[in-house]
């Protein structure tokens, strides 16, 4: 059964938009009115929106040796919200204007792990936090040689301090079940890999 949304972009009126801050992120204040499920229009409501570039995330997998590459780094957003501000994550980075998503994935893997991908497979894309941000995350699975590749990487110019961990596939799944991973991208990518790793070719 194909389900359709009740409304679309044509059922929103943007009354005004004001930029509150523009740095690494852009924060805007919007006043909008939208169609209600009753068929009437809502009163004008105010919402703050964090405008963010699109991003890619890459889970690294070595099909030959059944290994998973996971990075660890400090995340300010985890302060007070997680048991540890150092997070286990997949490789990720932002997409610049007119960049091809696969090229961004290849670049970010090189910068954050020093690895070269032999193949890349799209997983899905989604909105991580549509209640407050317009960021869209595009997930991929990258095939790479991971045996004995653990180490410390990242660009000093971007204040990156990244540690690459290599997990046996079953250990990664055990960590998923135990709550080791605390980001949506990592959880989704690992769940996808659990069901679809047969699609990833050995090199």
Image: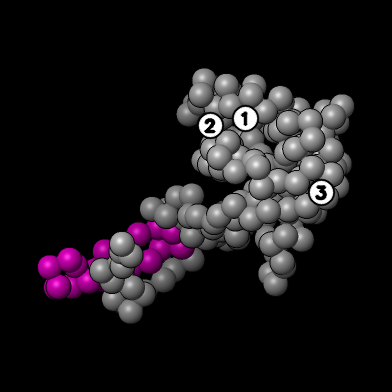
Viewer-nearest residue: 27 or 114: 114
Circles 1 and 3, Cβ within 8 Å, touching? The answer is no
Q: Which residue is the extreme one toward the front?
A: 198
Q: Mark 1 points at which residue?
A: 87
Viewer-nearest residue: 104 or 22: 104
In three-dimensional space, the C-alpha distance between marks 2 and 3, rounded to whole angstroms, equals 25 Å
Camera sees residue 19: yes
Judging from the image, what secondary structure is the residue with disc 1 in?
Answer: strand
Q: Give the range drawn in magenta.
A: 28-50
Circles 2 and 1, Cβ within 8 Å, touching? The answer is yes
Where residue 4 appears, as percent x and y from the top left, is 31, 67
Where residue 94 appears, as percent x and y from the top left, is 67, 55
Above or below for 46 versus 114: below
Horizontal side of residue 9 vs 151, given as left or right: left
Q: Which residue is located at x 26 percent, y 64 percent?
A: 45
Q: In which quarter of the image is residue 11?
A: bottom left
Camera sees residue 156: no
Count neighbours of disc 1 (C-alpha within 10 A) and say few if under 14, some if 14 to 19, many if 20 or more: many
In three-dimensional space, the C-alpha distance between marks 2 and 1, rounded to whole angstroms, equals 7 Å
Q: Counting residues from the N terminus, which is met first, the one under dot 2 or under dot 3?
A: 3
Specify the label residue 117 is tagged with: 3
Specify the label residue 182 is tagged with: 2
Above or below for 104 versus 164: below
Where residue 77 appears, as percent x and y from the top left, is 55, 36
Q: Which of marks 2 and 3 is in front?
A: 3
- Give yes or no for residue 29 being in the magenta stretch: yes
Above or below for 87 versus 118: above
Q: Which residue is located at x 84 percent, y 29 percent?
A: 147
Q: Which residue is located at x 31 percent, y 62 percent?
A: 1
């Amino acid at each position: 059964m194909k389900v359709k949304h009740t409304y679309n972009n044509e059922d929103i009126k943007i009354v005004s938009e004001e930029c509150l801050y523009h740095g690494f992120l852009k924060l805007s204040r919007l006043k909008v009115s939208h169609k209600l499920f009753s068929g009437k229009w809502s009163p004008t409501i105010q919402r703050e929106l964090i405008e963010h570039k699109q991003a890619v995330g890459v889970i690294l997998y070595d099909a030959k040796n059944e290994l998973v590459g996971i990075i660890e780094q400090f995340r300010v957003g985890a302060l007070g919200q997680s048991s540890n501000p150092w997070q286990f994550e997949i490789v990720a980075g932002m997409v610049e204007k007119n960049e091809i998503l696969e090229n961004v994935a290849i670049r970010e893997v090189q910068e954050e792990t020093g690895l070269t991908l032999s193949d890349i497979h799209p997983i899905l894309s989604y909105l991580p936090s549509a209640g407050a941000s317009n960021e869209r995350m595009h997930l991929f699975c990258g095939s790479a040689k991971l045996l004995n590749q653990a180490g410390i990487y990242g660009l000093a110019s971007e204040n990156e301090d990244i540690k690459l961990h290599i997990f046996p596939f079953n250990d990664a799944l055990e960590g998923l079940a135990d709550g080791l991973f605390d980001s949506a991208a990592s959880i989704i990518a690992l769940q996808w890999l659990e069901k679809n790793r047969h699609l990833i070719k050995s090199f």
